[in-house]
Image (tube, helix red, strand yellow):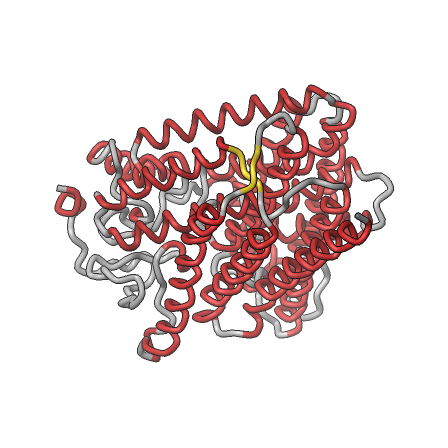
């Protein structure tokens, strides 16, 4: 028995080490590769390592409930139906494989909860935040040394759009704030606190509004789910957020510089952050109106998963910046209603399970409750369920939540997955990894040199799927983001 316990613990340590290596590689790739390659390379690393981890889990044997199998089957069946009716079936099948792969990874990546797992995830998230922070503060120093006027787009690195940085932090900062709020004796407390503050400074410099909206929403959600400890989360959010705000103001306006004048920096910073933060709506109303038109045209099965990214569907963006509207437009209104009902049911069940033993469970549930509630709020105004890095951290956070759920619900009958089911569950993950690998090699080996920087479809950065691009294995390298050529009218595509 002792030998088996040590073996199990060692295996979990290897898997955590593998996760840490994956996240570390994905965070430093942007500094090692040209921009054309690093998004594809990040996806390649993420998909392959998730495939390895799931393979290890399935070889060792996994348990699954009938409820989880039913949910996966619903996604598979409905996804297949809407893909067959899609404007571009192959791209839609890839999106279905993506969401199935995420769901399967969430279910199996962490079999059971323990405090060690929580501390390791906190340490990993904090370490990766510090990696990004180190790169970004180095950029901040360089722009002053080189007499370059302050511009947050020159500071925030590692993402093709600085808004994607705030999406990443939407998952990690609430999680880490919840962790320090309840882990009074953690050895990693100072590291976690420092990473939160340094990241707050940077995310406010980026001019994000959605992130702050998510943080406020997480406080409201935590007060409902965890009424006994929510004030601790509020306190640490206020402390870290206040220090971050002061630090951001100092770096933008007050930091003395012998090279660049304070006035020039303040003017540029105001234009890029404060004004944008308070007044600019990024054409959301127009975007949502266009999406509603798509929903009205195809209310039952949608236009097909991923296909709001197709040229001619939305005027400018490749997704609606609202995950409910995105589901309605791509998967159909019935599936979106099912998802909303499931989300509401899961929320009430989560609160009920915690309330069964609040003294023990509220503190353990705080990190994931804060993180997921912030992300759901941000998902109403942003594409947090679209970009690869955001999806990666979503998978890890939800996987941790699933481990808690499995530990707290021993009364739910779960049985070992037979071989045929394990193979079936791995199929979409293998397919997605294969497509990612082929896409990566295709872009590098077959794209004309001058077109290798062209934006790719939604999961493959944030560009448009060409109306001629029927084969995802050999992308046609369509025009850059927002530059749609020979665009058909939406009514031509939908009817």
The residue shown at (81%, 39%) is: 183
**Image quadrant of residue 291?**
top left
Which residue is at 65% across, 65% downward? Answer: 135
Q: Is residue 408 left or right of residue 376?
A: right
Q: Is residue 63 above or below residue 247?
A: above
Give x and y (percent) for residue 169.
60, 48
- Asked whether residue 105 appears in the rendered view, the answer is yes
Judged from this view, the residue extending furthest toward the right is 185
Judged left or right of residue 5, residue 253 is left
State the residue in front, 267 or 59: 59
Vertical relation: 408 (above or below) 243: above
Q: Quadrant of the C terminus?
A: top left
Please report the residue visible at 49 percent of the width from the left and 67 percent of the height from the top: 41
72 vs 351, nearest the viewer = 72
> Is 372 left or right of 86, judged from the image as shown?
right
In this orientation, which residue lies closer to the viewer: 172 or 317? 172
- Residue 331 is situated, as x and y percent measured from the top left of the image, at 32, 38
The location of residue 240, given as percent across then percent down, is 73, 42
Eyeballing the image, is 104 above or below 438?
above
């Amino acid at each position: 028995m002792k030998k088996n316990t040590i073996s199990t613990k060692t295996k979990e340590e290897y898997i955590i080490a593998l996760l840490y290596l994956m996240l570390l590689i994905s965070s430093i790739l942007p500094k090692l590769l040209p921009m054309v390659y690093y998004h594809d390379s990040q996806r390649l690393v993420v998909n392959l390592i998730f495939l390895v981890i799931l393979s290890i889990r399935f070889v060792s044997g996994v348990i699954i409930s009938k409820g989880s199998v039913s949910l996966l089957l619903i996604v598979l069946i409905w996804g297949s139906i809407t893909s067959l009716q899609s404007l571009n079936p192959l791209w839609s099948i890839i999106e279905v494989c993506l969401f199935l792969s995420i769901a399967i990874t969430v279910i199996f990546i962490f079999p059971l909860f323990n405090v060690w797992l929580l501390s390791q995830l906190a340490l990993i998230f904090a370490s990766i935040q510090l990696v990004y922070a180190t790169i970004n503060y180095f950029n901040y120093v360089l722009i002053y040394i080189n007499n370059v006027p302050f511009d947050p787009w020159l500071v925030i690195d590692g993402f093709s759009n600085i808004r994607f940085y705030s999406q990443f932090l939407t998952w990690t900062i609430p999680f880490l704030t919840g962790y320090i709020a309840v882990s009074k004796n953690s050895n990693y407390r100072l590291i976690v606190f420092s990473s939160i503050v340094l990241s707050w400074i940077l995310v406010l410099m980026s001019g994000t509004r959605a992130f702050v909206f998510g943080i406020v929403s997480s406080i409201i959600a935590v007060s409902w789910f965890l009424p006994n400890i929510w004030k601790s989360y509020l306190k640490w959010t206020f402390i870290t957020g206040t220090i971050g705000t002061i630090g951001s103001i100092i770096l933008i306006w007050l930091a003395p510089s012998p090279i660049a004048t304070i006035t020039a920096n303040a003017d540029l910073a105001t234009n890029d952050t404060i004004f944008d933060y308070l007044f600019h709506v990024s054409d959301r109303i127009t975007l949502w109106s266009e999406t509603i038109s798509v929903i009205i045209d195809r209310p039952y099965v949608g236009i097909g998963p991923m296909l709001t990214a197709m040229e001619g569907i939305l005027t400018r963006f490749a997704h609606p910046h609202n995950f409910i509207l995105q589901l309605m437009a791509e998967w159909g209104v019935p599936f979106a209603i099912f998802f909303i009902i499931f989300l509401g049911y899961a929320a009430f069940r989560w609160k009920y399970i915690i309330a069964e033993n609040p003294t023990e469970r509220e503190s353990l549930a705080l990190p994931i409750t804060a993180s997921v509630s912030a992300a759901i709020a941000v998902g109403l105004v942003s594409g947090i369920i679209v970009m690869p890095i955001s999806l990666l951290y979503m998978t890890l956070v939800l996987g941790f939540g699933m481990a808690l759920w499995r530990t707290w619900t021993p009364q739910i009958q779960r049985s070992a997955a037979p071989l045929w089911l394990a193979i079936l569950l791995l199929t979409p993950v293998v397919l997605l990894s294969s497509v990612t690998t082929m896409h990566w090699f295709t872009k590098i080996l077959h794209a004309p040199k001058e077109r290798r920087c062209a934006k790719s479809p939604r999961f493959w950065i944030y560009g448009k799927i060409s109306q001629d691009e029927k084969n995802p294995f050999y992308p046609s390298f369509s025009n850059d983001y927002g530059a749609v050529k020979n665009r058909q009218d939406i009514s031509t595509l939908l009817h």
